[in-house]
Amino acid sequence: MILFRYLAKEILISLFAVSATLLVIVMSGRFVKYLAQAAAGKLSPDILLNIMVYRLPSFLELVLPLSLFIAILLAYGRMYVESEMTVMAACGLSDRRLAVYTLVPSICVAVVVGYLSLYASPIGIGKVQEIFEDTQNSSGLELLIEGRFRVDEQSGRVTYVESLDNDVGIMQDVFSAEQSLGSEGEEQLTVIFAEQGNIQMSDDQQSRYLVLRNGYQSVGQPGGLRYRISQFDEYGQLVRDPAVQKTLYKRADARTTEQLLNSTLLEDKATLQWRMSLVILVPVIALIAQALSRTSHRRGRYVKMLPAFIIYITYLVALNAARDAIGKEKISSDLGMWWVHLVFLGLGITLLFGGDWLRRFRAPTASTPVASLP
């Protein structure tokens, strides 16, 4: 029990350190991307924190297995380099018992990953998709920043607001310029300036209008002499909502596990197996990490890091390939991703106990008689 507590403590300490480091790297990279979209006017700055919070479970479900894999490599590698594992083996700690001790914390991690993958992550992904699909966040007008020009990539409209009161939704000194085609097919430029403006919904709550007040509109061909200038007290401009921004997830990822269980769609079956695969992945890679952590003082603790990462990446790529193959009906959903786990489970067991089996196979079946002394 003392050895188990010591080994589990070393694994968990390394696990927390590696998880925190990887989580900061992943989240900071994603946050920088969202921040760049907000600075370009493609995303509302008010929803950045909500998006990051909702995406946290989906980050953790991928970070925790990798963190456990690295933690076992680092913790056991240090023990091998400092000859602690040699002393433990001399005291009767076999590879089989060490594997049992390793599986206990890995199963705890698998339970956490299962909760994240089967319950928390789908809820978070659904919330993120709701944010992106909300017209309040995707229409672009709420993304205006006072004192800065904003270009709508879909319509080409350039909008400028001198000041903006977010509490009441009133814009002051609004400028808008948009190129369009005239009745005869010629290019024309429409320039609008108004003292005030705000967003209003139609009676059926299906369309959005930018309502401008106390301004004028100028329509004509740049460089030409024919311009139509009109003054208005109130002017409504239909807002053409751009296409919903795509997330990194498929639609099935936002469905709950219960919905996936009751679904007959191949995409849903593949998604369900993917969520379960993240749970099965944890103890399998724990065994592989235990086998690859064997080293010596001369070789160092990092000598097997590269082949270990290659195996881990190959494992994930194979699972992703199997998921896509199920969705495209290239392989049966009954076979699914289970064959991938069996292959890598066999690899882990072979790496762990293959040497002992080979030595037993090569050992003579009968002992050689010893010559008697005269």
Image (spheres, rainbow, N blue to C red):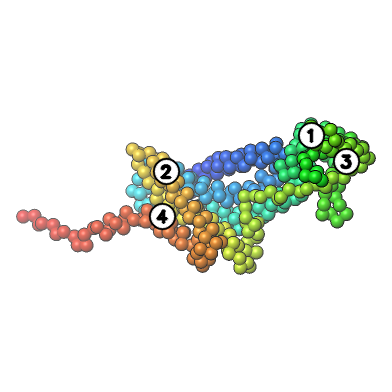
What crowding class fits label 2: few (fewer than 14 Cα within 10 Å), some (14-19), or many (20 or more)? few
In contact (CB < 8 Å): disc 2 and disc 4? no
- Please, what is the three-letter code of the amino acid marked with disc 1? Pro
Q: Are marks 1 and 2 in contact (CB under 8 Å)?
A: no
Badge 3 density bin: few <14, some 14–19, many ≥20, Cα 10 Å: many
Q: Nearer the viewer, mark 4 or mark 3?
A: 3
Quick one: label 1 or label 3, which is nearer the N terminus?
A: 3
Q: CA distance from mark 4 to mark 3?
A: 68 Å
Q: Earlier in the sequence, mark 1 or mark 4?
A: 1
Question: Which amino acid, by three-letter code, is at mark 3?
Answer: Leu
Residue holding disc 3? 212
Question: What x and y, as percent, mark residue 350?
Answer: 37, 56
Give the side of residue 37 with respect to residue 4, left or right.
right
Kindly identify which residue carries mark 2. Answer: 306
- Residue at the far left in the pictured view: 374
Q: Residue at x 42, y 43 (%)?
A: 306
- Is 203 in front, or is 61? 203
Q: Earlier in the sequence, mark 3 or mark 2?
A: 3
Residue 29 vs 129, above or below: the answer is above
